[in-house]
Amino acid sequence: MDQNKSRREFLAAGILTTMAVACNNNHSPFPADDIEASGEKVKLLSVDGNVIEVDKAFLKPVPHMPSVSNEEARKGIPGKKFVMVIDLSRCKNVKACQVACNHAHHVQDAQNWIKVYPMQDAQHTAPYWQPTICMHCDEPPCVKVCPVDATFKRQDGIVLIDADRCIGCRFCMAACPYSTRVFNWGEPDLPADIADKPYNPETSLPQKKGTVGKCDFCPDMTRMGMLPHCVSACPNGVYFFGDMNEDSVTNGAETFRFSDLVRDKAGYRLMEDLGTKPSVYYLPPVNRNFKFEEGLDTEDSTQKKS
Amino acid sequence: MKNLQNLSEDQITADLLPQKFGRRGKIWTAGLIVICCIGAFAYIKQLREGLVVTNMGDYASWGIYISNFVFFVAVSLVGSLITAIFRLSGVPWRTPLTRIAEIIAVSNITFAALIIIVDMGRPERLYFLFTHGRLQSPIMWDVIVITTYFFLSLLLLYITLIPDVKLMISLKDKLGKPFSKLYKWMASFWQGTEAQEKIRNKSITILCVTIVPVAFCIHTVTSWLFATTYRPGWDSTNFGAYFVSGAFLVGAGAVGIAMFVYRRVYKLENYITDDHFDKMGKITVMLALLYLYFNVNEFLVPAFKMKEEEKAYLNGLFTGDYSIMFWFAIMVGMIIPTLVLINKKGRKPLPMFIAGVMIVVGAWFKRYLIVTPTMLHPLLPKYNSPLRFNHYFPSWEEWAITIGSMAGVLLIITFFTRVFPIISIYKTLEDKHAITNKNETTEQYESNLQVS
Amino acid sequence: MKQLNNMKVIYKYLKLVISLVLLLGISIDTIQAQDSVASKTQLIISYFLPANKVPYLEVTTRKKIGRKFEAVKNIPVDIYFNEADPNNLLGKVITDTIGKGRIGLPPSFKNTWDSLNEFKFLAQSELPAGQDALSADITIKKAILSVDTTSVDGTRMVTAELKEKNGNDWVPVKDIDMKLAVKRMDANLSVGDKDFYTSDSTGVSSAEFKKDSIPGDKKGMITLVAEVDDNDTYGNLVTEKAVNWGKAIAPQKDFFAQRTLWAIRSETPIWLLFTVWGIAIGIWGTIIYLVIQILKIRKLGVSGPIKEDL
């Protein structure tokens, strides 16, 4: 893979690293033809009082990311292997994750991509709240059964859906053991500006009638250097997102070495025996921050909704 | 079969030629067309509004469309059973049943293919299966194998029809004009020369050998659509055999019904004899017991273990929400027909007809039970999802489309019967000659014995 | 209405009215209080010195809704040095979708920047008529942060030093909390066990590097990051240094070349391709053969002696 391409595919990181180069040799960080990286330069003062030319993108808090082509969305971000860690000892069923996710992805009706289950493993064991998202399995049963490559596994570990390809056979929904997939049974109710856009598998928008939807791990956010919506929305830091290839996960406030975290807290994956090899790890609900019952308050109102 | 001896060739031909619809026939056909139109109307509604018109949800994401698909595939298997297996094993009394079985197969496999398109959220993207098809998906295998079976069934039907159609061309004045062009296109080249006869016989044998494994495949692969998932009730290695045996049973039941109806409506008592009912009855008993055997395997073994994931599902079937339907399907679909047909008195036309109806109705509900209860018992609890998704009962649109598709199957069979002889005239005449010749030689043989 | 003549009723009525008025008054108050929390947009200005040593000022516009802040976008903000005088204007910015906007220091500001060590920056926003203008300011001291590595008895240490400009010299600052971390996606992973390390009397904070064999790039290079976050005097400072302390990560075997059941259609497993195509060709070969046989029968009939039906 040539340097140009990898930078385009993972631009946010690119901006930061090339910036360091830019200040050292006062050289334009982006080739002129690379319009995606703005290309325009501004002259600014360095802390030492020198006048330095940097790319205008430097002054953009949210980097402008043109939505990637279908081909690139199918390949994924090279060198990455995304992973999520969900700490059950911190979950209080606040459902801020669900609200943020539903809002960002325009999840239809009363459907949810994120579900927070009250779980009790056995009669005398303590109940706990268990948020589930798409497990982005490394051997995804849903992808195995798709007849038309509408759902696919990317090199960065993410399983996405191409709603322009999906024929709506719903075999993937039957195949998924985690009940994570939802179907757009009717015409989705979307704001006009979103409904008119071409479909982007990385945002799963705009949703299309007669096709399947599910959690997409927000690769569009990652490309902008931001965390998935559920991670940043959770007030209790339940969700940790990161890159297995960097061995690091963060919930925004805290950052852990992934291997240490799952080792020290005995991380596990759901339904390991099925051999689906999920990319989502759970930390068991020990030394909890909240009582299970505290989560019941939010339960009534949300159940009414559904 | 002995009746054939006493019938003249002209009489046989006259009895078996297709007949114009009588008053009953017209009412029957009109009724079927109306039901089909209601189904088509419901489908147009579904096309416009999406699958939201159904009562399916994210849990019961497959409903009676899929049940009905499995049902049609199952019934269509009978074409290979009666024609191919009987022919290859040299069953002598098969002649009046083969074409009935073949047209049942063709009409059912046609509607199986159509109903699966009805189930698609995006039917206009059907061609993606050919432009973007992934061979890893069991759906692709099913598409391939069903298309193949459709063409094989059609070929079998056509090759066996050729001499009859040729005969009908020669009886143009008797039959009138309506289909003469079609007949000419189909069979005007047939002269029954030895060379033609030889190729035709060889082709039929090859077809029969080919169609048996393909027929096993259509239903085995259909069972794999379920068995390749992790869900309770589907995650079973027994599934292929379970489906195929069930398919043979429902096919035999369907043929039993058709035999009775044709015999009654077209007065074919001389051709579809009590003896045929007796023999089909015995075969049906065997198939019912075979299916029962696979059912015992399918339910007793998991019920003995009562694994946590399967517990709610199995209890739902045995004693819960689905228990009435479950025991109905077992009793009415297998046990009562077996008890009826195991007696010699039960293997008469009317009891056979009733048993056939029970088998087919039981089989349809069995297919419903294969799909819906499993879908409603996912591995994780049903939660944080719209409450209406927690249950499933088909909407009127689903019923209309399903019943419309069944009417469509019957309509194909009805039209076929109007245009072509439902019992092969050519083969019946051949049988008659064989019997007569055999008797002649036997008599000669006996007289020779007496002389010596 | 008649009943109003009854004193008792009037009393009841009055009591109701009074309590209603009281209730209404209280509730209006609370609603107003909540409203003022919910509707008032906040403006914040902060100073950043990123790794490339080009400082910038970031303004944030947000409002509190319920218990959390939500971004307010499309707010025009003017940023001044010292006071809101057109001569002191450093730049104008409109906050984006996450309610943030940034400006760098323009070259015209060079003389001021070089001559002073402490700066006051002022952000102001003229909102549409009827709303109060927003304003925020920040005072920062010019400082630089550096990160380095040392080795003490074979133990790898990460050190960082914060220096402020005092007169014409850069002098170390003590008692500053800083993060010493390895740069990762979305966040930085502390090199040691603690989240923060405080600078000693020499202005240096140090931490033992405990992230052995943390994955680096192909050559094992990792980026060390020193960070001062949200300091009242110095703002936000970040600096980086690349070291070869990481575990070299071999380039991944080509993901898309794996022939598996979950791969894309062009990567169908060979055994499956053989099986499916084998069966399909076998059966369809037979079908084609049979069609040819029918054509043969047809040909025999057409070329034969009797042609009356054609």
Image (spheres, coloured by chain):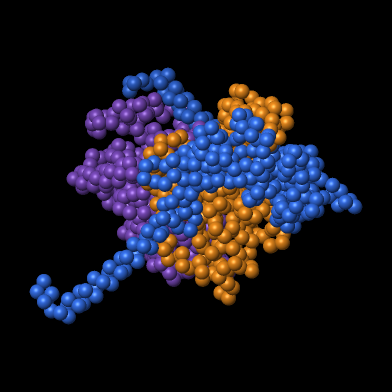
Is residue A95 shown left or right of residue B416?
right
Residue B87 in the image, given as x and y percentages of width and height: 48, 44
The answer to which quarter of the image holds residue B389 is bottom left
Horizontal and vertical percent for residue C271?
Answer: 65, 40
Q: Is residue B153 left or right of residue A36?
A: left
Q: In this view, does A6 lie above or below B239?
A: above
- Is residue B196 shown above or below C133? above
Between C245 and A70, the residue placed more toward the observer is C245
Residue at 27%, 69% in the rendered image: C20
Q: Residue furthest bottom?
A: C8
Towards the viewer: A173 or C122: C122
In the image shown, does C172 or A10 lie closer to the viewer? C172
Camera-nearest residue between A20 and C276: A20
> Residue B93, how many percent across, how many down?
42, 49
**Residue at screen point 48% across, 58% down:** C67
The chain drawn in blue is C
| Residue A236 showing in the rendered view | yes
Picture residue at 30% right of the left edge, 69% below the top: C22
Which residue lies at the image location 55% right of the left edge and 46% below the top edge?
C137
* Percent position of residue A163, x then y: 47, 40
Q: In this view, does A288 lie above or below C226?
A: below
Q: Inspect this view and state whether residue B366 appears.
A: no
Chain ID for purple? B
Which chain is in orange here? Answer: A
Q: Is residue B93 left or right of residue C116?
A: left
